[in-house]
Amino acid sequence: MTEAPELAVRLRDATWSSHQAAAGDGFLTGLLRGERSIDDYALLASQHLVVYRALETAVAASGSGLVAALHDEALERTAAIEADLDALGGIRMPTAAAVSYAAQLASLADDPVRLAAHHYTRYLGDLSGGQHIGRTLARRFGAGTTSFYRFAIDDLDAFKAQYRTTISTFGLDAEGEQALLEEAGRAYASAHALHASLATAGAEAAA
Ligand code: HEM
């Protein structure tokens, strides 16, 4: 009998189609193709500020061993986004989608499994495809605007491997696993909605 794949692999497999949808978002691909302006990038960074403040506040408030096992100070992005926004000329308005994403995160401070799902979706993404995004944006807008994508972590692959091992050894029961997979799906949906809101905001700004 073959063993079921470990939880980190099932999490990735269960959410990969949602990942592909979020990664293929028109706003993001347009930004990477050079079809969007530095103001559009500032708009995206401003939404990140709202989302990561909420995520990092919820993580700090959580007090859960499970979240603490996943977390590392080197992941925290709020100060990096603030520095990028200084270089980008200040904070732009958050969209309704970003505000509702942040509210979703704030509501999870007492729900470690669901908070872990968001932690994974944001930070493992930033350490993965985010590295490619950061290099492309740095070439276009200057490295002084892309601290968000740079981590004080020596070996990203080793860090990600350890992160996946931590997820796989959470010791979740079936209900906990179900909640983790479901909430990761919601996290991707929120990221998707956030990008969609920027496509509209960009169009409004251009009108
Ligand atoms: C242009 C956009 C994107 C590209 C090109 C991209 C690309 C990738 C690639 C190549 C990987 C696999 C890397 C590896 O196996 O180590 C990956 C992993 C990941 N990405 Fe993205 N990504 C993008 C956007 C996003 C977004 C918007 C999110 C979430 C908000 C996200 C979340 C993740 C996560 C959580 C993983 C880790 C999956 C796992 O191994 O469990 N990505 N991405």
Image: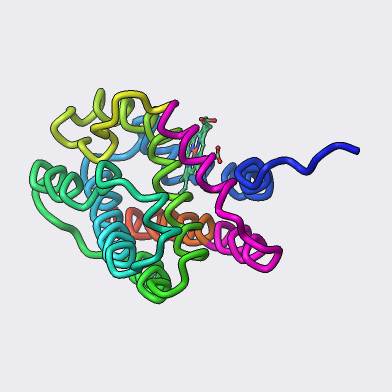
Query: Percent x, y for residue 65?
Result: 41, 60
Q: Residue at x 86, y 37 (%)?
A: 2
| Residue 168 part of the magenta segment | yes
Query: Percent x, y for residue 144?
Result: 13, 32
Q: In this view of the protein, can residue 3 be seen by the observer?
A: yes
**In the picture provided, is 29 more to the left or to the right than 175?**
left
Looking at the image, is 196 positioned above or below residue 7? below
Outermost right residue: 1
| Residue 4 part of the magenta segment | no
**Residue 80: which quarter of the image?**
top left
Q: Residue at x 59, y 42 (%)?
A: 20
Total of numbered circles in the picture? 0
Query: Percent x, y for residue 173?
Result: 67, 63
Looking at the image, is 167 positioned above or below residue 185? above
Of residues 11 and 70, the one drawn nearer to the viewer in this rendering: 70
| Quarter containing the C terminus | bottom left
Q: In this view of the protein, can residue 40 be seen by the observer?
A: no
Magenta-colored segment: predominant secondary structure = helix
Of residues 180 and 168, the one drawn nearer to the viewer in this rendering: 168
Looking at the image, is 136 positioned above or below residue 111? above
Please provide the residue range marked out in magenta.
Answer: 158-186
**In the picture provided, is 170 more to the left or to the right than 32?**
right
**Residue 127: which quarter of the image?**
top left
Query: Percent x, y for residue 145?
Result: 17, 36
| Quarter containing the N terminus | top right
Of residues 9 and 168, the one drawn nearer to the viewer in this rendering: 168
Q: Residue at x 54, y 40 (%)?
A: 165
Q: Residue at x 29, y 54 (%)?
A: 48
